[in-house]
Structure formats: C-alpha cells, structure tokens
Image: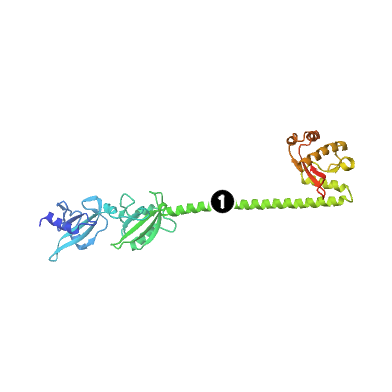
C-alpha cells in the first residue's frame, strides 16, 4: 500500500471529533504529512524517543511543521511482529478548541479555560486572543481571601476550588470555579464577570432600595400625619380648656357682680381678651324704664358720653333685631341694609364687630353682648 492510501486508511479510522489530521512518523525520523509528503524532521523529533512513550497524549506543544501553531497530539504505535513500524499521530489544533465546546449559563457570558495542571499551560482560553501560561496571572489582583499561589497549588495537585481575581481587560472582578477533568492532569475553569454574576442580585438590590425608600416615605408621611393629628388634638384640647377657663372666669365675675357691680366690668374684660376684641360691652334694653338703653363696657373709664353711647348702641340693637346675631369684618357690607346705623358706627371708627343677643327665660331679648 502506498503512503497516500495508508494515511487515508488511518485517517478514516481516527477521523471525527477533535482530530483534524493524521500523520505517520517512521524510523529514521521521516514524517508522512496529510499532503502525502515525506519530511525529514530529525532536527526536531527523534523516532526512538517518541517510541518509548508508547500510546500517549501530548501536552500543549508547537507543531513541528509550524512554530506558530499550538497543538495536542495523540500517539498510537503501529506494531508488527513485535516491531514498531511507525507511530500514528492524531493532530488537534488548539486554536479550534473553543469552537468545539458550547458554554451555557449566565446568558452564554461565561468564559471557559482548560489548563495543564503540572505545566500551567492553557489548552483553551475563550477570553484571550492567545494561549499563555498560568504565570500570566502574576499581575492579576486577587480578591481578599484568595491568592494566585493557592490556584497554582490546586491545579498542580488536581484539587477543585474557587477564586476571584481582577481582570484588567474587563475592568472588573471575575468569579471562578475550577476542577479536574479526568483527562491527564487537565483542569477546567469557568469564570463569569461580577456584573453578570450579580446582575439579578443588583436588580433585586435596587428594587429593595426603592421599596425601602417608598416605605420610609410612607412612614414619614404617616408620622407627619400622626404628629399633625396629635397637634390638632392638642390645640383643640387647649381651646376647650381655654373655653372652660373662660366660662368659669366669666361665671365667677357675674356671680360676684351681685355683691360688687364692678365685677361685671371685669367679666366684660375677660370676654374682650378671649374674643381678641378691643372692647366688649353689654347693652341692656331699658326702653320700658327710660325709653332707651343702658350700656356696660369693658372700657368704662374710656367710653364716650352717654348720649352718644345710647345713639350708637340703639343703632346696634336695631341691627340685631333684624339679624338675630351678627359678625361683621367689613362694615361696607351692611351699608345698604342699615345705612343710618352704619354711618353711626363709621363715625366712631368701628370697622368690625360681633353682636350676640342675650334672652330671658321667656325668649325675649334682655340685651346684647358684643365686641368691637
């Protein structure tokens, strides 16, 4: 059988999988290539030395025919009558390794490495453009708790483990897991970038932060509402307490007025303070007695002449009979209904007032309590 046919038969036998081509090494260091050429490679390889290895799988090595090409080589001796006639080589190009494996996980964003544990040579590297050695990790910064030395020891002893290192190329940390393959001393290592590994966790973290912010805002609003409600209750309680104190003080002064009439004036002063009025007065309807009215004022010592007071409060009494009660902040609103009375009030500089009727038990108006 000629060389071409013989090589073709062997290629049919070993073809498929990762083997790309077959070669035969004959005694005398003669290499039969896939192109059918016989080359003398005695300056690079010794048949006798290779024969001693028997059936084997080489490590990462340079192709004897192309120094720029890195390969793996499966060697099978061809023996006849106890004599090795040739060595059959199956050649695997390491540059094609990444295309032979599919990496699934993290959206296909994982990286895969195959490393010779003893030598540290990379057989496959899906991240970098060229195959290097573990020594290239020397300038990589490892995360706290990890070290390059530990990785080298684990690889050389075939132990599984994890590591975290900083990639200058990516500008971030990579999380890695490695373990033995079960072929020779090979180790497989898979890595994934921190941004990919924690992408979901980062989304959850942001969601939790927004949830916490929303909860804090809700609690803040609720707290403000509670404080506001407490404050309103406090103000309302203070108003009720003030009203009770006011009523008690007025009641006290009025009861004392039976003994000392001047206490009635003191009661009007209390009313003026409570109502924030400049003056509080009590207009007594005494038309049946003297055809007019009698006025008691909190400013008894500063009040106008009696005749002017009667003129003024007679007008007020007339207005109250029409309105039952009256609270006015702008006297101009009453000028159409009560033109004469409004003129009297304006003449005395009165611009707002409050009038409340005081009735007898039979429902008749006994007088008017008012504030100016």
Give the quadrant of the C terminus. top right
Query: Is there any visible trace of residue 372 in the rendered image?
Result: no
- Please indicate whether residue 299 sits to the left or right of residue 36 in the image: right
Q: Position of residue 30 (x, y in %)?
A: 15, 55
Crowd tier of the residue under label 1, counting other residues whose Cα lies within 10 Å: few below 14, some 14–19, many 20 or above: few
Give the quadrant of the N terminus. bottom left
Placement of 81 over or under 242, stated as above or below: below
* Nearest the eye: 183 or 269: 269
Dot 1: element: helix
**Which residue in the structure is indicated by mark 1?**
217
* Nearest the eye: 16 or 228: 228
* Nearest the eye: 167 or 152: 167
* Nearest the eye: 46 or 165: 165
Measuring 69% from the left and 52% from the top, which residue is drawn there? 234
Query: Is there any visible trace of residue 6 in the rendered image?
Result: yes
Measuring 80% from the left and 39% from the top, which residue is drawn there? 318
């Amino acid at each position: 059988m000629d060389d071409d046919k013989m090589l073709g038969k062997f290629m049919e036998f070993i073809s498929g999988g990762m083997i790309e081509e077959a070669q035969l090494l004959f005694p005398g260091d003669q290499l039969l290539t896939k192109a059918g050429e016989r080359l003398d490679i005695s300056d690079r390889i010794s048949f006798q030395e290779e024969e001693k290895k028997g059936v084997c799988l080489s490590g990462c090595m340079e192709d004897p025919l192309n120094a720029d090409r890195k390969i793996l080589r499966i060697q099978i001796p061809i023996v006849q009558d106890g004599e090795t006639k040739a060595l059959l080589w199956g050649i695997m190009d390491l540059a094609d390794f990444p295309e032979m494996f599919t990496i699934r996980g993290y959206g296909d964003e994982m990286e895969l490495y195959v490393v010779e544990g003893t030598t540290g040579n990379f057989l496959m590297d899906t991240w970098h453009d060229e195959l290097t050695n573990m020594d290239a990790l020397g300038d990589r910064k490892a995360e706290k708790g990890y070290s390059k030395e530990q990785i080298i020891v684990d690889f050389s002893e075939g132990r599984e483990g994890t590591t975290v290192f900083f990639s200058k190329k990516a500008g971030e940390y990579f999380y890695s897991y490695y373990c033995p393959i079960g072929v020779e001393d090979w180790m497989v290592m898979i890595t994934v970038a921190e941004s990919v590994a924690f992408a979901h966790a980062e989304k959850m973290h942001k969601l939790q932060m927004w949830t916490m912010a929303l909860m804090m805002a809700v609690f803040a609003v609720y707290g403000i509402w509670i404080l506001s409600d407490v404050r309103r209750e406090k103000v309302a309680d203070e108003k009720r307490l003030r009203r009770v104190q006011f009523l008690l003080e007025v009641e006290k002064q009025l009861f004392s007025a039976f003994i000392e009439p001047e206490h009635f004036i003191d009661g009007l002063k209390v009313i003026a303070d409570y109502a924030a009025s400049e003056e509080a007065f009590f207009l007594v309807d005494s038309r049946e007695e003297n055809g007019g009215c009698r006025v008691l004022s909190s400013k008894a010592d500063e009040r106008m002449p009696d005749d002017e007071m009667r003129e003024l409060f007679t007008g007020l009494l007339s207005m109250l009979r029409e309105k039952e009660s009256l609270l006015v902040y702008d006297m101009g609103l009453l000028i159409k209904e009560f033109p004469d009375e409004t003129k009297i009030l304006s003449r005395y500089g009165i611009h707002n007032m409050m009038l409340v009727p005081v009735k007898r038990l039979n429902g008749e108006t006994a007088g008017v309590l008012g504030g100016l």
